[in-house]
Amino acid sequence: MEYYESLGLEPHLTLDPADLQQRFYTRSRQWHPDRFSRASAEEQQKALDMTALLNDAFRTLRDPVTRAEYFLKQNHIELGKEAPPELLEDVFELNMALDELRGGDESARPQLAEARKRFGAMLEEIDADLAGLSLKYDQSLSEPILEGIRGALNRRRYVSNLIRSAEEVLNATILSGEESSN
C-alpha cells in the first residue's frame, strides 16, 4: 500500500478529501526538489522519486473509483474483463442501436440517447453502491465485501465504456451531419 504510506494514511477505502489534500501538500513541500538543490545527487534523486510517488498517490487516492481499483490490486484481487451477465441484454441492444446510427439510420438516435441516460443513472447507482460497500469494508474489514466492491467496479467499468461508446457515436454522427450540411 505504497500510496497510502507515502501520504501517511491508513489503508482505507473511504478517505477525507480535505485531509488527503492537506497531507499531499505537506509532503509535497517536504520533498520538493528545490529544497534539495544543494544536496547530493542521491538525495536529489530521492526527492524527485518521492515527488513522483506523491503525485501518483494523490491522483489515485483522491478519486473513489481509482482508489478502490488500487486497493483491490494491492490485495491481489483482479477486476474482470467480461461483461457482467446482468448487462448482456442492454449491451446487445446498445450495440444494435450504435450500428444502426453508424449506418445512417437516424431513427436509432432517440433510442441511443435514452440508453445513454439510462446508463448514466446506472453509473450513479453503482457509485452509491461502491461508496456504501467501501464504508462497510472499512468498518468490518470483511474480505467478502471486497468481492462486492470488485463486482461494482466491474459493472462500473463496463457501464462507463457503454456511455463513452454512445457519446462518441452520437457526437460523431452529429458532427458528420453538420459537415455534410455545410
Image (cartoon, helix red, strand yellow):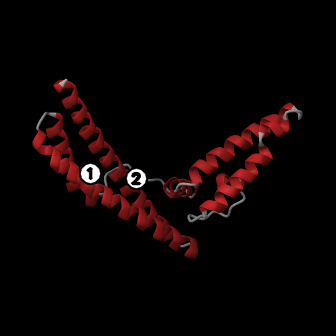
Taking depth in this image into account, of 63 and 29 the one nearest to the observer is: 29
Location of residue 75 in the rendering, given as x and y in whole percent from the top left corner: 56, 58
Give the tally of numbered discs.
Answer: 2
Which residue appears at 84% of the width and 37% of the height?
A: 36
Give left or right: position of 8 versus 152: right
Q: Quadrant of residue 97?
A: top left
SS at badge 1: helix
Give left or right: position of 136 versus 157: right
Q: Nearer the viewer, mark 2 or mark 1?
A: 1
The tag on residue 45 is: none
Residue type beneath disc 2: Gly
Residue type beneath disc 1: Arg
Location of residue 54 in the rendering, given as x and y in whole percent from the top left corner: 68, 47
The tag on residue 116 is: 1
**Up/down of 129 relative to 79, above or below:** below
The first of marks 2 and 1 along the sequence is 2
- Tag 2 near tag 1, CB within 8 Å: no
Mark 2 lies on residue? 80
Which residue appears at 68% of the width and 41% of the height?
A: 52
Q: Quadrant of residue 108?
A: top left
SS at badge 2: loop
Location of residue 5 in the rendering, given as x and y in whole percent from the top left corner: 70, 56
Which residue appears at 33% of the width and 44% of the height?
A: 164
Location of residue 133 in the rendering, given as x and y in whole percent from the top left corner: 47, 69
Spatial separation of the CA atoms under disc 2 and disc 1: 23 Å
Query: Which quadrant holds the C terminus?
Result: top left
Query: Which quadrant holds the N terminus?
Result: bottom right
Q: Residue furthest front?
A: 182
